[in-house]
Image (cartoon, coloured by chain):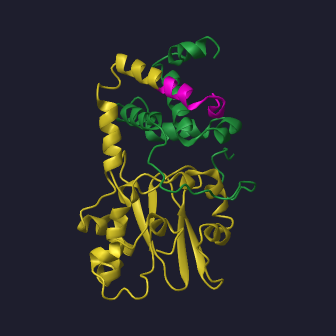
Chain colours: A yellow, B green
Amino acid sequence: MSGNHHGSSAISERVRHVEALLEARGLVDEGEVDRRIDEFLAGGSPANGARITARAWVDPDFRDRLLADANAAIREVGLSMAGGLQEQRLKVVANTEDEHNVVVCTLCSCYPIALLGPSPAWYKSEAYRSRVVRDPRGVLAEFGLELPTTTRISVWDASAESRYVVVPRRPEGTDGMSEEQLAGLVTRKGLIGTAAV
Amino acid sequence: MSRINDVGGMVGFPAVVEEPDEPAFHADWEAHVLALNAALIRRGVYNLDEFRDAIERMPPDTYLSSSYYEKWFTAITTLLVEKGIATPEELATPEELAGG
């Protein structure tokens, strides 16, 4: 069964075979696979996390509500953690001058898809999952994020029921920018904590 | 007892590699695996915890040598057999049955 012993065409053939069998047994409807793929891809994007971050930057009251009860706060902007197979608890953590936050799922790949979309392969890799909890500063440096030794780093380990999102620090020199322009500055890595913004 | 998926803090893994402009799926079959899993969970063939468990009890060498969606596919076929939906022979392609 080891995947590396098969070429991609072999696994593709195996998946097709199982899919046909499940369709024949009435466990998957015609067209359902394509529909579910479309739903997944439409289910979230980093633009959602960026929108929340920009709102938190311009509205301190929203920021307070977001950090206190993220599930409730994101509903204010039309987002929800209930769209997946089960409702997930969301905790939002904000970077400050003294503290940087970074998110991982050491056990598998738990990730706030509703706010960030599909996760990148590195997030799911054993390399990231094993190392970021032991040597966060070193792993962040590999991402090009060199933090001062005085900055405390908190690593948040997601689980089946709980997901985390980071609010990066608002960059200097952005006072005149609109909320929409600010959202455009925020990256997926910033929201996971492997980039500054 | 910890399983192989519990890698937090484990030493020996290499540097993290980022892929520029990474697509959501690297091949069509990966998207199909994701969709099949969602369909089976929605129908109650198994639940999300059973699915996670089926990944986490993979033998360590298989777990570590499988890609992300290869792990998912292994878990799906394991559960289809355990739930009595299909036999291993039925899940195998003709090529696999011929020893391919």
Which residue is pictured at 54% across the width and 51% down the height? A121
* Whole-percent x, y for residue B4 in the image: 67, 44
Which residue is pictured at 38% across the width and 61% down the height? A46
In the figure, B66 relative to A80: above or below?
above
On the question of residue A188 being in view, the answer is yes
* Whole-percent x, y for residue A105 in the image: 55, 56
Which residue is pictured at 47% across the width and 53% down the height? A119
**View extreme (front): residue:** B21
* Magenta span includes A9: yes
* Magenta span includes B6: no
* Whole-percent x, y for residue B86 in the image: 48, 17
Left or right of residue A14: residue A7:
right
* Whole-percent x, y for residue A94 in the image: 45, 76
Residue range of the region highlighted in magenta in the rendering: A1-15
Q: For the N terminus of chain A, which image quadrant?
A: top right
Report the front residue among A97 and B49.
Answer: A97
